[in-house]
Amino acid sequence: MAEKTLREFSVPSTDNVATGPNINVGDVNFKLKSSLINMVQASPLCGKPNEDANAHLQNFLELCDTVVIRGVAADAIKLRLFPFSLLGKAKQWFYKEKDIDTWAKCSKAFLAKFFPLGKTNALHGRNQVSSRRGWNPSQKLGRGCKNTSWPILTTAWTSGSSYKASTTGSQ
């Protein structure tokens, strides 16, 4: 084995570049179309506190549902495409996560990181305050319903909670 010079040790190398989790796509090698990548990149999540991770996932899954590649599992497509929907801190987080090997693990870890309990509790509190406006659970939900109310409304309904939630999610 030849000895390395100091200069050889200081030369940048791709050996330490984070590449994200290893995604098992089976025996099939596939390519994502650039138009699909562009659509996913059109509304990235950066990991800022004011961003809605739930809405980001909803938009991402909506786009993924339009893609079918013969012989490739939908989860493999989602895992391969997901990093293109991230920027900044969110992308750094994804590349540090080495134990993500399924879409279920990825989406769960993503929501745990970028839709933390504090944000959920804030929405829960906001819905309790807006319940004083007299929303009746038997009313039909209109088009003005924001998606952020659904997880809280569903959780309250399934857990038997007695509070009422706003259909608009507004304060």
Image (cartoon, rainbow, N blue to C red):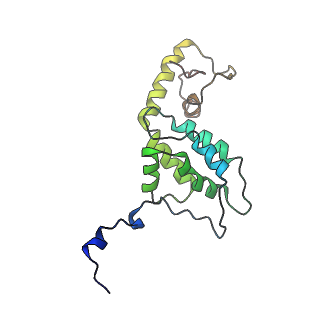
Which quadrant of the view contains residue 4? bottom left
Which residue sits furthest bottom? 1
Whether 95 is drawn above or below 61: the answer is: below
Q: 57 or 171: nearer the eye? A: 57
Which residue sits furthest right? 70
Whether 40 is drawn above or below 135: the answer is: below
Q: Residue at x 28, y 82 (%)?
A: 3
Whether 10 is drawn above or below 122: the answer is: below
Q: Where is residue 5 in the image (x, y as percent from the top left)?
A: 26, 77
Q: Where is residue 113 in the image (x, y as percent from the top left)?
A: 44, 44
Residue 155 in the figure: left or right of residue 47: right
Q: 40 or 96: nearer the eye? A: 40
Q: 154 or 17: nearer the eye? A: 17
Q: Residue at x 42, y 34 (%)?
A: 49
Q: Residue at x 48, y 18 (%)?
A: 129
Q: Which residue is drawn at 71% across and 51% down?
A: 67
